[in-house]
Image (cartoon, rainbow, N blue to C red):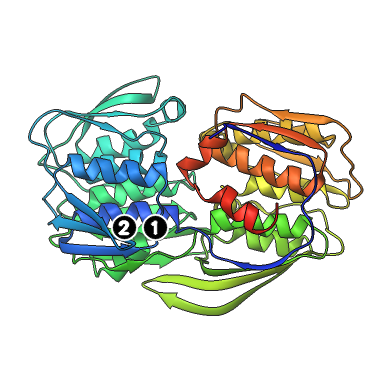
């Protein structure tokens, strides 16, 4: 397979219904929870991306049996203390920040050295943010420059902590929740609003967790877990993956799209709220609750006109993976859009705030960017009359997919490198693009 995609023309108007791959966050968490379960767990629509497969390889290395049969994945859990760490072990999280950070909380009660490594991209990301609270439980860490590789030695005498998570990082919050599950007593977390899949799965599994939702933060109490029941799960569609096709519809003339069975968890729909504020009609149809998560079919149609936005910062955490796409919508809007407090964007697979601005500049859109904010001067009549090459963007899967959406939406001649990066999160991305006649 070539690692370069060439696009030379806009997509034609479309009216389609599509299915998108399973939710990555839920897929990874299902694997981790099921590995601790007492018995056999089964999942359908598990996302078969590199991040999820890396998670499966890790639990297999820790002694858990995994089987695939007839579009189902089966995990044979050995109970809450069934993960086997009886000697020094090396865990490779590859590109997955979710796996890398959550597995540390999961294994914090093991006293053998655990070395955590990752690929080139993950090895540039901050792990001190999760090592600090886990140290307070009683674990010890060796890490240089706050990044991977690191070594953790856990403890059999963990102490509960009070943790103030003020970044809006679901990964750090979840790592502390998993550590709290290993600890006698009550662990308390005051967490800035972020994705709450770990909490919802914990509640569905009847684990000893209490949650009080406030406007800007959540209060979480977690006690030691003695047993987790098996989890049979039909994993809903990933909103972050669906976002590419939602925005493609928004930026294409006379187009409509329905995406079925999407996870519309309130902590994930920042993109939807922002697009609605910008003048986009988006409807949730057949809303229902499935094992703690809200699920719906999403209908979106292309608007006649897009408004600029001064984006409220409380929406940031719910749209953190979709801001590259939101920037494209702002580029086609009337007026100046302003997004601030986005430093967390630069803690992803690449410095996405900086690179997102660079892509807009290549397209001919003026931006003013600081280390944590961006102003985008929209141009509804934008015509690109030059060749655009997207290369050396740290092989970031969302940079690649966003560039494809930009090329199909705005036209001109695009040469986009690192196509294989989509295997990290969304291997079927190009297949669905073709279904839409892109």
- Give the alpha-carbon distance from disc 1 to disc 2, as whole Å: 6 Å
Label placed on residue 304 = none
Q: Seen in the image, is 419 located left or right of residue 256?
A: left
**Residue appearing at x 42%, y 46% in the figure:** 49
231 or 114: nearer the viewer = 231
Asked which quadrant contains residue 272, the reply is bottom right
Q: Position of residue 279 (x, y in %)?
A: 79, 64
Q: Is residue 207 above or below residue 403?
A: below
> Picture coordinates of residue 157 (x, y %)?
11, 42
- Residues at badges 1 and 2 in contact (C-beta under 8 Å)? yes
| Residue 224 seen anywhere in this rendered image of the structure | no
Residue nearest the viewer, comparing 437 with 61: 437
Left or right for 400, reference 135: right
Corner quadrant of residue 79: bottom left
Mark 1, Cα crowd under 10 Å, few <14 / some 14-19 / many 20+, is: many
Left or right position of 328 against 216: right
Q: Is 420 drawn above or below residue 315 in the view shown?
A: above
Residue underneath mark 2: 30
SS for callout 2: helix
165 left or right of 356 in image: left
Name the quadrant containing residue 109.
top left
User: Residue 72 appears at what percent x and percent y?
Assistant: 31, 62
User: Can you identify the residue that label 1 sits on?
Assistant: 26
Task: Report helix, strand or loop for mark 1.
Answer: helix
Q: Is residue 60 visible?
A: yes
Residue 176: x %, y % from top left: 31, 47
């Amino acid at each position: 397979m070539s690692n370069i995609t060439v696009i030379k023309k806009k997509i034609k108007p479309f009216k389609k219904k599509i299915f998108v791959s399973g939710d990555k966050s839920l897929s990874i968490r299902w694997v981790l929870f099921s590995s601790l379960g007492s018995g056999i767990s089964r999942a359908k629509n598990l996302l078969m991306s590199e991040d999820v497969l890396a998670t499966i390889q890790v639990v297999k290395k820790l002694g858990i049996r995994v089987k695939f049969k007839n579009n189902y994945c089966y995990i044979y859990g050995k109970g809450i203390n069934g993960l086997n760490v009886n000697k020094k072990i090396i865990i490779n999280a590859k590109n997955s920040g979710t796996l890398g950070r959550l597995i540390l909380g999961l294994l914090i009660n093991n006293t053998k050295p655990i070395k955590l490594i990752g690929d080139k991209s993950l090895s540039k990301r901050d792990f001190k943010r999760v090592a600090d609270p886990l140290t307070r439980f009683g674990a010890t860490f060796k890490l240089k420059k706050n990044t991977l590789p690191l070594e953790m030695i856990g403890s059999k005498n963990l102490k509960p902590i009070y943790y103030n998570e003020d970044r809006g990082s679901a990964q750090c919050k979840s790592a502390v929740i998993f550590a709290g599950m290993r600890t006698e007593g009550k662990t308390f977390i005051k967490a800035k609003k972020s994705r709450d899949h770990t909490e919802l799965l914990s509640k569905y599994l009847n684990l000893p967790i209490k949650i009080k939702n406030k406007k800007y933060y959540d209060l979480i109490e977690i006690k030691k877990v003695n047993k987790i029941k098996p989890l049979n799960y039909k994993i809903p569609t990933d909103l972050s993956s669906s976002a590419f096709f939602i925005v493609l519809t928004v930026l294409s003339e006379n187009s409509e799209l329905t995406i079925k069975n999407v996870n519309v968890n309130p902590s994930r729909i920042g993109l939807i709220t922002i697009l609605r504020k910008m003048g986009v009609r988006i409807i949730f149809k057949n809303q229902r609750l499935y094992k703690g998560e809200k699920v719906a079919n999403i209908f979106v149609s292309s608007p006649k006109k897009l408004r600029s936005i001064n984006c409220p910062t409380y929406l940031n955490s719910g749209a953190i993976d979709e801001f590259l796409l939101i920037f494209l919508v702002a580029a086609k809007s009337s007026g100046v859009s302003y997004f601030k407090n986005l430093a967390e964007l630069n803690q992803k697979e690449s410095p996405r705030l900086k690179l997102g601005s660079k892509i807009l500049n290549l397209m001919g859109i003026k931006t003013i960017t600081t280390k944590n904010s961006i102003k985008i001067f929209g141009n509804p009549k934008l015509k690109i009359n030059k060749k655009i090459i997207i290369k050396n963007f740290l092989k970031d899967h969302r940079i690649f997919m966003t560039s494809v959406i930009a090329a199909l939406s705005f036209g001109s001649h695009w040469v986009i490198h690192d196509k294989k990066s989509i295997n990290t999160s969304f291997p079927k991305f190009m297949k669905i693009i073709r279904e839409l006649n892109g």
